Image (cartoon, grey):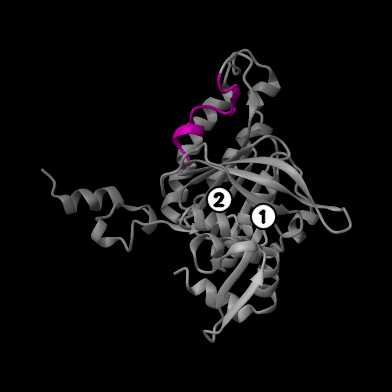
Amino acid sequence: MPTLEETLKKLNKGKAEQDQVKKVSEIETLNFEYSSIRSAYLSHIMDYNVVPMGAMTLLTGWEGSGKSSIALLIAKDIQEKYKNKTVVVLDGEQTITDSHVERFKLDKSRLIVYKDSVLENMLDTAEAFSQSEDIGGIIIDSVKAFYSVAVEAKSAEDYSIGVEAKKLGTRLPIINANCARRKTALIVLNQWRENPGVMHGDTKVLPGGNWNRYMPYTHLDFTKKELIRDSNKEVVGHKLDVRVRKSKGGAFDKKDVITLNFYYEGGFNEIDEYAQIFCETGVVKVGGAGWITFPDRNAEEKKVQGTDKFAEYLKTNPEDFEFLKQQLI
C-alpha cells in the first residue's frame, strides 16, 4: 500500500505549484482575501467580506439596475489592490465603451474587454484566463446575453432544451476551481426574467440553470429606485437597493434592504457613506435637531448640524476624516 507521501507525489507529478494537492500545514492560509464594489457602507455592513478572491460572486437584477457598472467598480478595486493583476471582461452584451472605462478610471493596460455572444467562445476564453497567474478577476457580463452555437445552428442533433444551462453547469465549476487555486475573483452577472409557469409567490427566475443557487460564494441583488438629481435638476445617479441573497462570509436575511446612492460618475461617494457609518456606529454623537458632535484629531470637540454639513466637514478636513475612520477599527 502506498504511503501518504507517495500518494501526494503521484498526484502532484507534472502539476504546477498552485494546482498541487498539499497538507494544510504547507499552505499559507485557507482564508479568502476580498475585493469590493467600492461602497464603504456595504463593505461595513458585510464586515468587508464582499467579493472573494478565489470564488464566484453573482450580481443579479433587472435590466438597467447598474450590474455592469458595479462589475467595473469591482474591476477598479482589484486593479488598485493587486497592482500586477489584469482584469478580463467577457462582454456578451457588447455594451462596454471607452466612456465606461474612463468614468471609473480603469487602467487600460491591465484591462481586457472581449466582445462575443457565443457561449462556447466565452467559456473557452474564461477557462483559458482562469489558468493564468496574471489575472485578478474574470467578469462574465452577462449570462442571459450568451447563446450556444447549437441553438444558432438549430440542429436537431445538437440542440436540446436547456443546452445553455447544461453547458454552464458543466464548465463553470471547472473555471471556478481554477480561479480558486489562483485567488482570482470570478464575477458573473445575470438578469431576472418572469417565469410564466408560476402564478403565486416569487414569479421571477434566473436563466442558466441551478448553478445560480449553489455555486456563488456571494450573491448580491440590485434594484434601481428613484433618480438622484443635482442642484440643476440634472440626473446624476439613482438610489440602489441591495439585497445580500447569499454570503458564505456571514449571515444575512435576503429580505433586508441596504439602500445606497449610486452616481454615474465614479460610483459611490466614500465620504457620504462614511458619514452615515460614523453616525450609526456611535463614532460620533447624534443629538436633537440633527446636531452631530465628534472629536477631531487633536481631541477638540466639533459640532455641526445635519449629515450634509458633517460630510462637508469631512471633505474639507481629510486628516480628521482619517482619524474618525481609525475609530472604527
In the image shown, does 246 or 160 lie closer to the viewer? Answer: 246
- Read off the residue under disc 2: 129
Is residue 48 shown above or below 80? above
* CB under 8 Å between discs 1 and 2: yes
Q: Write down the region rendered in magenta.
A: 201-216
Q: Which mark is residue 112?
A: 1
Using the rendered image of the protein, determine whether residue 16 is visible from the camera's viewpoint: no
In the image shown, does 78 or 164 lie closer to the viewer? Answer: 78
**Type of amino acid under label 1:** Ile
In the image shown, does 141 or 219 lie closer to the viewer? Answer: 219
Q: Position of residue 27 (x, y in %)?
A: 30, 60
- Residue 33 placement: quadrant: bottom left
Q: Position of residue 125 (x, y in %)?
A: 59, 44
Q: Residue at x 27, y 61 (%)?
A: 26
Q: Position of residue 134 (x, y in %)?
A: 54, 60
Using the rendered image of the protein, determine whether residue 131 is visible from the camera's viewpoint: yes
Sort mark 2 into few (<14), some (14-19) or many (20+) by Cα contacts within 10 Å.
Answer: many
